[in-house]
Image (cartoon, helix red, strand yellow):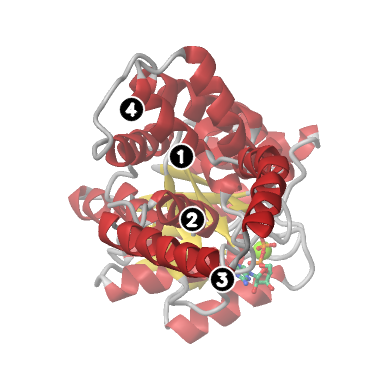
Amino acid sequence: MFDFLKKTIKSWVGKTEKPSTKSVKKQAKKKETTKKQTKKTQTKQEQQTEQEVEAILAPTLETKQEEEKESFFSKLVKKLTAAQLSEEDFNDAFEDLEIILLENNTALEAVEAIRESLKKELVGLNCKKQEAPTRILEALKSSILSILQEPPSLLTAIQEKKGSPYVILFFGINGTGKTTSIAKVAHYLKQNKISCVLAAGDTFRAASIEQLEHHAKALNVPCIKGTYEADPASIAFNAIGYAKAHAIQVVLIDTAGRMYTKTNLMKEMEKIIRVSKPHLKIFVGESITGNDALDQARTFNETAGIDGSILTKADIDEKAGTILSIAQVTNKPIFFLGTGQSYKDLLPFTKKTVLKNLGVE
Ligand SMILES: Nc1nc2c(ncn2[C@@H]2O[C@H](COP(=O)(O)OP(=O)(O)O)[C@@H](O)[C@H]2O)c(=O)[nH]1
Ligand SMILES: [Mg+2]
């Protein structure tokens, strides 16, 4: 997760690390002695030519060094320590980070949010050379944290819910990993000694009921189903009834992968929500599809009102900008990341895990 940012930070810090003064002096001394030694063996004529050549080459060498692209980090370190950082200098330096973020699937809105937050912390700042790297990394850290919502503890919310089951509804488009994520959540709950029942609310797609039943068997949890084409709202209703009758703590409702553009499917969704009154509506999206996932999250949030997301397939691609973008656009927490195909591949997503992954904690 966020490997691109971690790598970027590492490269920044590595590049600005100056060699110790000791080694610089040592190198300079070495150069000086070799120069003296060569000079001894050179004739006056040769020395003159050498000086002329150096004079011609010098400006070219200087421009070459200037042309080497400076990073957001090194530019800022330089400016921050020279004077108060101006907005212009900040914008100039930010371009480098902006490209890195965009290249890694971060949506423009999220890039802008990071820019604004960083700008607030850094413009007008003037600090000592040794402090600059930490100040910049701290600012970056808080700008990323500012677009992420800390998810409430799911386990606590479930444990505190007494009397009736805690209902979680999952939705998203086909193939994003809803059914797999439900099985992973069931496994996670079981590990935390919380009982659950699965509701096979995808009565639309061939083999979807069997797929959920297969997981239920493997996890040894009950699964409530109907026939294909049955009303998913009634299946959700039956599953909640079953949970009440058997003192089961959580109901996990699977739904058909609906296109967020299809009005009737969205209407059906509204009915499931009305009937099951979920405590948590989870959008399941792929963390790898960039703008598509972002559009889905935005539309589902506007039409159904999501309480948070599970972003799957984080193991496939390290371009984790989609995660930042969905968090920013929905302004809702990300509860878990799916990180593989087995039940244990579900990573609780907290601000702390993000910082650990960035290596700037
Ligand atoms: N690599 C990887 N594959 C996943 C993950 N989550 C789901 N999948 C795979 O994505 C495919 C579609 O998943 P499924 O749960 O059927 O999606 P649904 O149509 O939304 O219910 C399956 O092949 C899953 O094994 C994940 O986190 N990582
Ligand atoms: Mg499914």
* Sequence-first tag of 3 and 1: 3
Residue in the foreground of this view, choosing between 70 and 119: 70
Q: State the SS at label 3.
A: helix
* Sequence-first tag of 2 and 4: 2
* Sequence-first tag of 1 and 4: 1
Q: Which residue is mark 3?
A: 41
Q: Residue at x 54, y 47 (%)?
A: 323
Q: Does the image show residue 305?
A: no
Q: Nearer the viewer, mark 4 or mark 3?
A: 3
Give the residue type that dot 2 points to. Answer: Ser
Q: Which residue is mark 1?
A: 73
Drawn side of residue 244 relative to residue 109, left or right = left
Q: State the SS at label 4.
A: helix
Q: Residue at x 61, y 44 (%)?
A: 65
Q: Residue furthest front?
A: 44
* Sequence-first tag of 2 and 3: 2
Residue in the foreground of this view, choosing between 336 and 199: 336
Q: State the SS at label 2.
A: helix
